Amino acid sequence: MTNQLNFEPKPRWILSVRDLPEARERARYQVTGADGQAAEVVLDKRKRQVVDALLSGELYCASTVRIGDIIFRLKEDNGLHAETKALANGRKYYTLQGKVQFLGPVSKEGAC
């Protein structure tokens, strides 16, 4: 008899906006794609919350509509790719592709 272990990922559940990180102000990120190209992007509001949450690990959303649009906008607007994967039971979750590094907050324009 062979002992097989199933190390299926355990994505973090996002049941409401309260489960996302609180920070919504502008911040810079360095994104390195699979092709090795690096770019700096500035994110704020919900995009920043979703990326910060993805940086801590995979995310499962009770309704993929909640963050699915943000995942799409991150790809289209910012070149930041999140992959949709599925668990054995068919539930879909998101994980970041490539390398994403938080560089720090962006000061408000015109502020001293």
Image (cartoon, rainbow, N blue to C red):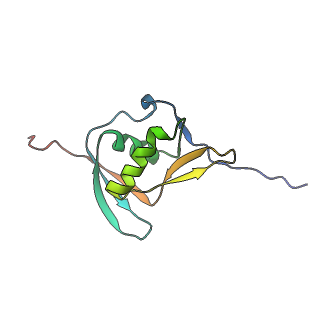
Question: In which quadrant of the rendered image does the N terminus lie?
Answer: bottom right
Q: Position of residue 56 (x, y in %)?
A: 47, 44
Q: Position of residue 90 (x, y in %)?
A: 65, 46
Q: Could you tell me which residue is drawn at 40 percent across and 35 percent down?
A: 21
Q: Could you tell me which residue is drawn at 87 percent across and 55 percent down?
A: 2
User: Where 20 sits versus 89, above or below?
Assistant: above
- Furthest toward the bottom, the residue is 35
How many circles with numbers are drawn on the protein? 0
Residue 52 picture quarter: top left
In the visual, does 73 lie left or right of 6? left
Q: Could you tell me which residue is drawn at 76 percent across and 50 percent down?
A: 5
- Furthest toward the right, the residue is 1
User: Where 108 sits versus 37, above or below?
Assistant: above
Q: Could you tell me which residue is drawn at 22 percent across and 46 percent down?
A: 106
Question: In which quadrant of the rendered image does the C terminus lie?
Answer: top left
Is 1 in front, or is 20? 20
Residue 47 picture quarter: top left
